[in-house]
Image: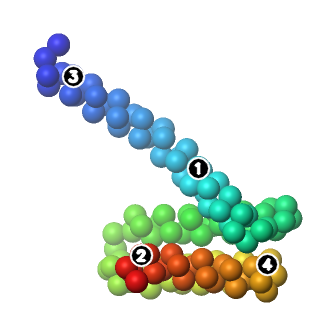
Amino acid sequence: MNRSSILSRFLVIALLFLGFAAPLFAQTMEGLQMAELTRKLQLTGQQQKQLAPIVEQRDKEAQALKTNTSLSRMQKFRKIGEIQTNFRNQAAKILNPEQVKKLDALQAERRGKLTGH
């Protein structure tokens, strides 16, 4: 087998893997986010059940925004802020005041990492 044939086969296999792995990766990331929120906010089982669809919706909106090519970078930045604010407000209805403070701190920490501060 020549080098270009091997490379072509590798590329096809990689693309097939990505097609199958992307949904699994998204589910894994969502699961990791819920695990992190559960641990850091000390969520009860009931809170986990209530918060899971809110996390899922936030992630779907963020993914749709990421793939939207009609918006400018600044428009996307504003929209992701709206998505996060909406998530926080919905989560605050489920969490106790101490958990809301911890969530706010987590979101501030993530914003700092994204902006380099």
Using the image as rendered, state which of residue 26 and residue 40 is in the foreground.
40
Instruction: Measuring from the top left, give residue 78's x and y in whole percent.
Output: 44, 85
The residue beneath circle 2 is: 114
The amino acid type of the residue labelled 4 equals Leu
Between tags 3 and 2, which lies in front? 2
* Circle number at residue 95: 4
Instruction: Measuring from the top left, give residue 107's x and y in whole percent.
Output: 57, 79
SS for callout 4? loop
Instruction: Measuring from the top left, give residue 80's x and y in whole percent.
Output: 48, 78
- Judge left or right: residue 95 versus residue 30: right
Structure colour scheme: rainbow
Q: Residues within 10 Å of mark 3 (few under 14, many from 20)?
A: few
Q: Quadrant of residue 88?
A: bottom right
Residue under the point 54% across and 69% down: 61
The amino acid type of the residue labelled 2 equals Leu
The amino acid type of the residue labelled 1 equals Thr
Q: Residues within 10 Å of mark 2 (few under 14, many from 20)?
A: few
Task: Check the image and name the residue furthest to the top.
Answer: 1
* Circle number at residue 6: 3
Q: How far apart are marks 3 and 2 (CA)?
A: 39 Å
Using the image as rendered, state which of residue 69 and residue 88 is in the foreground.
88
Q: Is residue 23 depicted above or below 53 in this figure?
A: above
User: Number of numbered discs present?
Assistant: 4
User: Can residue 53 be seen from the camera position used here?
Assistant: no
Q: How far apart are marks 4 and 2 (CA)?
A: 25 Å
Residue under the point 79% across and 86% down: 97
Using the image as rendered, state which of residue 40 and residue 8 is in the foreground.
40
* Circle number at residue 28: 1
Lower sequence index among marks 1 and 3: 3
SS for callout 1? helix
The amino acid type of the residue labelled 3 equals Ile
Q: Quadrant of residue 8?
A: top left
